[in-house]
Amino acid sequence: MASLLRDVRVVIFVSLLAAALVVIYMPSPLGPGILGGPSGNLKFGLDLVGGSRLQVELKGVIVKVDAPGMNESQIRNFLQNRTGAEVIPVRYKGEIMYEIRKDITKEQLEEILKEKNASIGLDRQGKPLFFKGLTRETVEETRKIMETKLNMLGLKSVVTRTVADNIIMIDLAGVPIDEARRIIGTPGKFEIRMQTVGDKGDISEGQMLSEIKNMTVHVLYGEDIVYVDPMPHRGENGKWGASFKLSDDGADKLRNAAIKYGAVENPDNHELVMLLDDIVIYSAPLKPTAASSLSSKPLKEWIAETGFGEEGKKKAEELIIHLRAGVLPVPVEILASGEVTPPLGEKFREGSVIALILALIVVGVMIMIRYKDVRVVMPLVLTLLSEVIMMLGFAAAIGWQLDLPSIAGIITVIGTGVDQLVMITDEAMAGGKTSGRVYYRRVSFAYSIIFASVVTTIVAMLTLASMALGVLRGFAIVTIVGLLIGILVTRPAYAKTLEYLL
């Protein structure tokens, strides 16, 4: 027995099993540990705890523009000024096209282009090159920002994935459908504008940009904000606020606008307005000291004051979230939504546990019927159980959310594991008691077949994991991890244990 426990394969097996149990049940920043009950530090997706799933469409178009006498920069600036949206030149199938980060129809764009005697460009078949959608880079940027913002709101059980050129799927475990729709509807396009006409107090929070009767002009987008203090700032006067820093370019834009539209001389009637999805979330005049400084130089560091007391602090915290998230570069719309209620999620979770236990029991019964030897049945079933624990430990260590596809992956690993362990057992028991050299030759033969099977399965799972079918990604990843644990850790330890027992 001592020789078995000293074997490097068995030592690695026992060490990883112990590490998995520690990760699952040790209280730490990962979770409550043993205090969290049987699930420990494991995290579950909305399938197993309830929650909401939303399908979000990103609004934007990509178009080719034929504008005689205008270069790329002029076309971009013209489209930005007339559409009020950010415009990015992109290369599509060898053509220079323009990504307009706003929902605009073909007819609306044609009317705008007529002002410059321009038109929508044609492809080689003579069809207009205009379609709804965004570049892959923009979609991924939006997905990351959206996930960051949701996590900053304290929603750690968030999974986002892209499924099309302009579609993002979002899972919010433990969040009711009404709250999910409200939260997802909030992240949007952040913009700072300046009041050019009107009086102090004309603009108020909650107003739509289209409802503002006095004139405002675009100054900068969220991308010009390079740093936001994560903590609310409290000034000497007791007012709370959000402290942020602009880029060099952003500071220049703000100064130029303040001088051009009179905010330097008359700050009270030229408020800075912050908007999210064209809705005012903050509006206030420049401080006299800031206005005076802007007359001589750009200012990079700013504090948006939000008021006194707890209400002022809460507003500052909300504003910090909008500023820090970098904000979405494009508007979004919720296309579809679905909900798994907590009781239903609990039933799914209980059913998953029962399915895992039944799978192990059925495997044990079948192995007993086949070999009629407890020396084979016990190590085989314990090996499969240890693989399940190691996979769960891996999920807990990286914060992976277990969902129904992930549970299906674990059961799949049990099924393939039985097949592989049976191959090792058959080879080990063939011909009765043999010398160590013959035993290793037989086991090596089985192992070569198992290795080839594992490699081909992993290649197939990698393809599935890399596709946009996000709901199946958990299945693929768990299956890959389980196969690697089996081929590298549990199979060698099982073969050594079987040699000792037989």
Image: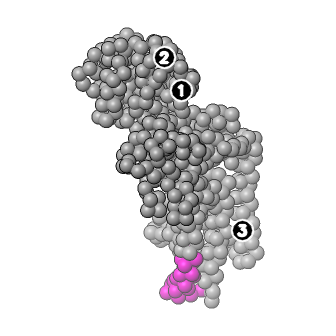
Are there few (<14), some (14-19), or many (20+) residues within 10 Å of tag 3?
some
Which residue is disc 3 drawn over? 363
Q: Is residue 31 visible?
A: no
Task: From the image, tell me which residue sits under label 1.
Answer: 209
Q: Amino acid at mark 2?
A: Gly
Q: Which mark is residue 312?
A: 2
| Mark 2 and mark 1 residues within 8 Å of each other at the beta carbon | no
Earlier sequence position, callout 2 versus callout 1? 1
**Are circles 3 and 2 on residues that touch, CB within 8 Å?**
no
Gap between marks 1 and 3 measured at Cα: 65 Å
Residue 276 shown in magenta: no
Overall secondary structure of the magenta section: helix
Q: What percent of the width, then of the height, locates residue 204?
A: 52, 18
Type of amino acid under label 1: Leu
Which quadrant of the view contains residue 154?
A: top right
Q: CA distance from mark 3 to mark 2?
A: 62 Å
Q: Position of residue 21 (x, y in %)?
A: 55, 52
Residue shown at 76% from the left, 75% from the top: 369
Q: Residue at x 51, y 24 (%)?
A: 281
Q: Would you call the spot at circle 2 few (<14 residues within 10 Å), some (14-19), or many (20 or more)?
A: some
Residue located at (49% from left, 28% from top)? 275
In the rendered image, is residue 212 in sight?
Answer: yes
- Magenta stretch, residue numbers: 433-454
> Is residue 440 magenta-colored?
yes
Q: Where residue 365 sits in the image (x, y, percent)?
A: 75, 69
